[in-house]
Image (tube, helix red, strand yellow):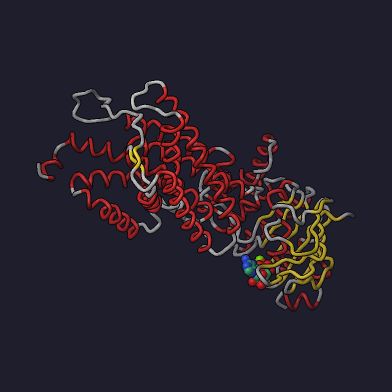
Amino acid sequence: MTPLFAALDTQALTQYLINGLSYGMLIALVALGYTMVYGIVELINFAHGDLFMLGAFLGWTIITAVFKVSPDDAVLGPVALLVCFVIVPAFCGLLNFSVDRVIYRPLRKAPRLAPLVSAIGVSFIFQNLGLFWGGPQDVDFPKLVSNKNLLGLDATVRFTYQDLLVVGVTIPLMIALTVFVKLTPLGKAMRATAQNPTAAQLMGINTERVIATTFILGGTLAGFGAMIYGLTINSIHYQMGFLVGLYAFTAAVLGGIGNIPGAVLGGLLIGLVRSLGSAYVGERWTGALIFAMLIVVLVFRPAGLLGARVREKV
Amino acid sequence: MAALLSLDLLRAGYGPIDALHDVSIQVSEGEIVALIGANGAGKTTTLMSISGVVKARSGTVSFDGRDITRMPAHEIVKLGLAQSPEGRKIFPRLTVLENLQMGAFTRSDRDGVATDLEKAFVMFPILRERKNQPGGLLSGGQQQMLAIARALMARPKLLMLDEPSLGLAPQIVVQIFDVVKELNKTGMSVLLVEQNARMALKVAHRGYVLETGRVTMADEAQKLLHDPRVRAAYLGE
Ligand SMILES: Nc1ncnc2c1ncn2[C@@H]1O[C@H](COP(=O)(O)OP(=O)(O)OP(=O)(O)O)[C@@H](O)[C@H]1O
Ligand SMILES: [Mg+2]
């Protein structure tokens, strides 16, 4: 079948949309960490993708070395999963917090370039840790969630248990994050600090505490993303943080860096372009397509799709 | 009368430069004190040092009987010291209502906060009308009202205002100075920084003149208003 005929096939199209949205949600989880941290300290946290990678290695270690789960263990598998979904996000949140506390925070008042270069340094350190942890080769991540079709064995469109996992983890997290940021005092303090840190201090907001919370939240989301990546892609590698991080960062910029719904929108768009692009144009073009989309969007909306809709009056 | 706020030989600055040299200022309970001076004299630095945003290099700041020189900014607000900063510093993408709620961030008395919110809306009815709009969409004068109302939401003992009249139409300036007088009648102390020295000295009880980081004159506001040097340098005569 030529690509043109494939384009007319609505079942195939539905499938590409499902795959694209599923991958896009994963990217969105990682993108949130970039955008929240940028929003509050204007730092592009280059180590964020590698933090995500370390989370995946921790999940792998818990499943294979701590629980020693065999592929179709119906009891130990779910238990290990549950443990992973608590420990890996907590680990990533705390690690992100620690890096901020030890490295970025002392540089808070230094010129922008200082924390930026430090973040690149942390990225390399994390990659070396990953190399030490898992070795230079691809590492199999146990397939604890099946990719059986939920829509029935002979249905033509596939929506698998893995897809359900992605949706079932990501959507509640995004709802929780939105409620937190919109409605809780700490969430409002976070938005206030992002918009004007000096004014936030004058309101009695402990801005350092708010920044720490932001790093914890961003790291936690990356940890969830790491588990989803491992369980759906089933193969991890110490350099995987680079590409996922790059896509996620691009998603954040596409949506408008610093903007939370923007990061989610950007992630979904990237997932869709990646999936539709590899189906209709060819897999090797997906990178070019994604960045072409980024450039087109930025030419027309330099602040990103949802960035800075409200102008500040001076 | 014991001073509510007292700066003693305060020195503060940025990088290698001291912007304030041994500044001593007092504000007593119930007083309006004006701090006037030219561009770059150090007025904003003085207020930011009091609020703890700029750290003192030497000297002391005490408020309500406590030494707050080294206290973090977010704790100082809790003691009853609020500031409406230069340039207003509204949160542009928070609604007017959320901006006001941020002003009460350190308070836990819900009923009191609700009462003060109502007072703010009575004082500035336009803020009620626009309470669900982003702060960044307000006009300059409305933003100034929001900045003052936001500071008042902390229910401060001392309110500091940095150039509340800057860039505003004359009738709005009058309205804002009326509010300052009203607040003072209810017992609130005010430290008022202004380039509009005439307006400031008219409402103030006492005033200080700041020149390149030093206090060069301190007197009753009426006397400063009639002082030939002040008239020449700050009242354009
Ligand atoms: N963030 C800063 N970094 C470096 N120097 C600063 C900073 N803010 C102010 N200064 C310098 O400190 C001195 C005092 O400035 P300050 O803003 O306190 O004056 P001001 O009296 O408030 O002036 P204006 O009437 O223009 O508001 C000036 O020389 C100014 O250039
Ligand atoms: Mg100033």
Q: Residue at x 77, y 49 (%)?
A: B157
Residue B203, by quadrant, is bottom right
Q: Nearer the viewer, residue B142 or A225?
A: A225
The answer to which of A70 and A118 lies nearer the viewer is A70
**Residue A13: where, in percent of width, then height?**
20, 38
Instruction: Report the side of A278 relative to A254 (left or right).
Output: left
Nearer to us in this view, A184 or B195? A184
Residue A227 to residue B59: above or below: above
Camera sees residue B130:
no
Q: Is residue B36 left or right of residue A71?
A: right
Residue B49, percent from left and from top: 72, 60
Quarter holding the N terminus of chain A is: top left
List the single residue furthest toward the top.
A75
**x, y (%) of residue A67?**
44, 28
The quarter of the rendering in which ligand 2 is drawn is bottom right
Q: Quadrant of residue B198?
A: bottom right
Image quarter for residue A69? Answer: top left
Residue drawn at 40 percent across, 56 percent down: A303
Quarter placement of the C terminus of chain A: bottom right
Instruction: Report the label total.
Output: 0
Please state the horizontal and vertical placement of residue B48, each as a whole percent of the image.
Answer: 69, 60
Q: Residue furthest right?
A: B1
Look at the image and tell me whether residue B155 can be seen. yes
